Amino acid sequence: MKLPAIMQGDARKRLLQGACVGALATTVIGFSWGGWTLAKTADRMADQRANSAVVAALAPICVDKFQRATEAKATLAKLKTIDSWQQDRFVVDGGWATFPGGEPNRDVAEACAKMLGQMK
């Protein structure tokens, strides 16, 4: 059986080189600009989005719990005197970022402190 001219000698070598370069270019372009991801990356992104959704849902509840607490105005004034990097700890210690059946959520406490800091 005689091979076609493109598969003989130097032409076959060039064809295989082109196929390898094309596969490599497709992979690089796909992961760089095409939006391709590995399962591990997709899982990490899904976890981040889920965490963001939880924080967005629970932070207003935290603020409401804070506002309904006794002496909320005085506590808010005290919160505003604390350094911003320690405000989440204040919210956690106050119990406003703790929800039934769980432990205090630091991300919710941080978002809650930011929301409270913007209040007058």
Image (cartoon, grey):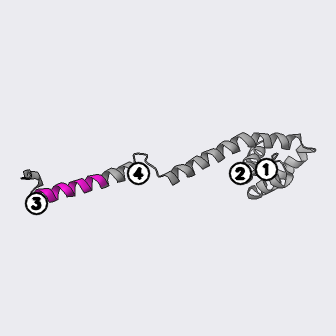
Question: In the visual, does 31 lie left or right of 44?
Answer: left
Q: Name the N-terminal-most of marks 4 and 1.
A: 4
Q: Residue at x 75, y 51 (%)?
A: 105
Q: Residues within 10 Å of mark 3 (few under 14, many from 20)?
A: few
Q: Gap between marks 3 and 1, in whole Å?
A: 69 Å
Closer mark to the observer between disc 4 and disc 1: 1
Q: N-terminal of the two: label 3 or label 4?
A: 3
Q: CA distance from mark 3 to mark 2?
A: 62 Å
Question: Which residue is denoted by mark 1 in the rendering?
Answer: 102
Inspect the image, locate mark 2, and give the three-letter code of the amino acid beneath it.
Asp
Amino acid type at circle 4 is Phe
Q: Which residue is mark 3?
A: 10
Q: Earlier in the sequence, mark 3 or mark 2?
A: 3
Q: Is 29 left, or right, of 61 in this rendering?
A: left
| On-image quarter of the C terminus | top right
Q: Earlier in the sequence, mark 2 or mark 1?
A: 1
The majority secondary structure of the magenta stretch comes to: helix
Q: Is residue 54 magenta?
A: no
- Give the label on residue 31, or none: 4
Is 78 or 103 nearer to us in this picture?
Answer: 103
